[in-house]
Image (tube, rainbow, N blue to C red):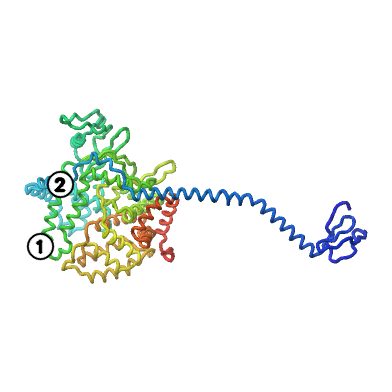
Amino acid sequence: LLFQRRVPCSSFGPLRSRGTELKLVRQSPLRIQARRGFTVLTPSARSAAATAEASAARSASRHKGSRFRWWLRRVALPGFGLVAAIAASNGALMAYRDYSVPPPASAVAASAGEGSLMDRPDRAAAVLTKRRLLMRALWLLWSFSMVILMAPLAILSPNYCEARYYRQIYEAIVYSRSAALAKWAQWASIRLDLLPATLCDLLAQLQSQAPIHSAKHTLKELEAAGLEVHGLGGAAWSTETTSKGSKPPAGVLTELDAGPFASGSIAQVHHARWCGKPVILKVRHPRVDEELLLDFELLLQAANLVHTYIPPLRWLNAPATVSQFEAAMSGQTDLSEEGRHLERFSYNFRRKNAWMTFPKVYFATESVLIESFEPGELASEVVKRGQELPRSEAHFIIVRGEDVYLQMLLVDNFMHADLHPGNMLFRLIGPFDMPQLSLIDGGMSARLTDDERRNFIGLLQALGDGDGLRVADRVLAFSKRPAQGGRDTEGFINDVCTMCAQQARGYFTNMDIGVVLRDMMQLMYRHGVAIDGNYATLIANLLCLEGLARQLEPRFNLFDIAYPLLRGHQVLGDEYFRQGYIFAQWIVPLPMWEMFHMLSLYSAMNGEKLKKFQL
């Protein structure tokens, strides 16, 4: 035998292998060496050898992995920590600057007008003459004469309402050219829970198809703003020089459409080009500020009559309600104010501009506004597609619309007060058809006081907790006016507690926020509880979003999706929540925000499964 072998054996002593006698040379605990190169192992020696081999294998394996562990411990982890620290400190610095430094000065300020007519008492007094008020009252009475005359027949015959009467109401609003009535119609068009569907469909046309004015008036306003126009309606045209010594033209518009592609209650909208870029030109309707002032003066006088001579309706405080609606509408008559609002919204949502945009303002005066063209389909048209709309797109509109509303309410304290579907655009951008929303028409905006924010946010949080007593307490604080004689406070509290026990049991209980708010408003009417104007605006916007969500996805729960932000605000408090949210916008990467929205979507669709996990 010319090679070494290991032969197992069970005892010491002479061994025979292939007829050859082997004599033991040396014994040891590990092995027995014999002549002719044999190695004889005892059972204990075999176990020790196996242990030694396994240890050697592990040592070799550790040696092979030592290089990777050294690189991970000395290079990768410190490098990743350094990059994360730099990114976090940079984001924190940017967030601190954004929080502590106000936005840059408005580019609209240099070209802005003198403000709304309602804010200038000298001119307002010249408009509100007895003769003009009488003429306006007669005009409105003439416009609604058929509606008034046919009202008894409409009450007696529901078929007549569906066939003719609702269209008569729509035609009377269009014929009157009243901006106040047109704005009411825009809000009422999505209230399918309050008004018949036939009437809502007709009123929805006023969101973008209100009465238009002539091209002559458009050119007159552009000339007064110092703008030159080349190529009106396909033909070369330019404004003549105004009076001697006037300011030089502020810019040149080209390819201006002679007719508008949309018209609202305050202004109509044209396509044009500004410095080679496609833009939207908004021109205010003629005398709209004067007519709005006259309409509100007539409404205020009617409200005073109701408040004085009908005691059971004094709890409504109709004069204050009309005054608050007038204040909200007055900002829309000055288009330069709308330009400043759009700039503020763009600044607040600049971190989310990948999916939420606002038009960029190029030029603005009291009656002319030039802003960037935002392509897309109106949400009012998207809703009409119903179940044909892909579910991913429907969910995107609902989730991001809710996110915008909550950020305006909880963080920015600057609300878009006109969130009906006619002011929301939806589009797909890029090679991968990424969805994006755009909000337009920022004329009606509201900034809340500390008490208003505390009361309304507290109402939403109390509904989330299912606490009927807190809900009633917050609603009673919605009015700064002292309680009138017809206000039944105790009955209102008892009915609200009963309603919450049945319909508002908290988050993830399939609570329908639209039904809850409507029932609550009915209880307010029944017990004589009035609210101030800003609270009515907040509730109306929330109901607009709820109506939009219900039409796009009936299974979607709008209140459950607000749980993370409302609960976070409740736990951290207002100031810490706002600071934390602003810092998180810059520190947390966008993919993490996408995951947050996906989780919100899951909670909105499967709320009952998550109730046991809520904080």
User: Which corner quadrant of the image does residue 155 belong to?
Assistant: bottom left
Q: Quadrant of the C terminus?
A: bottom left
Q: Is residue 175 visible?
A: no
User: Which of the marked residues, 1 or 2, is nearer the chain's N terminus?
Assistant: 2
> Which of 491 and 75 lies nearest the eye of the viewer?
75
Which residue type does callout 1 highlight? Tyr
At 27% from the left and 32% from the top, the residue drawn is: 254
Q: Residue 612: percent from the left, percent from the top?
A: 43, 66
Query: Under tag 2, what secondary structure?
Result: loop
Q: Which residue is mark 2?
A: 120
Q: Residue 84: percent from the left, percent from the top?
A: 48, 50
Q: Which residue is mark 1?
A: 309
Q: Is residue 314 found left or right of 268 in the rendered image? A: left
Are the residues at dot 1 and dot 2 in contact (C-beta closer than 8 Å)?
A: no
Which residue type does callout 2 highlight? Arg
Query: Under tag 1, what secondary structure?
Result: helix
Q: Residue furthest left?
A: 131
At 18% from the left and 32% from the top, the residue drawn is: 246
User: Which corner quadrant of the image does residue 38 belong to?
Assistant: bottom right
Please tell me the numbered disc located at residue 336.
none
Q: Is residue 611 visible?
A: yes
Q: Residue 151: percent from the left, percent from the top?
A: 15, 56
At 28% from the left and 37% from the top, the residue drawn is: 271
Q: Residue 535: percent from the left, percent from the top?
A: 25, 58
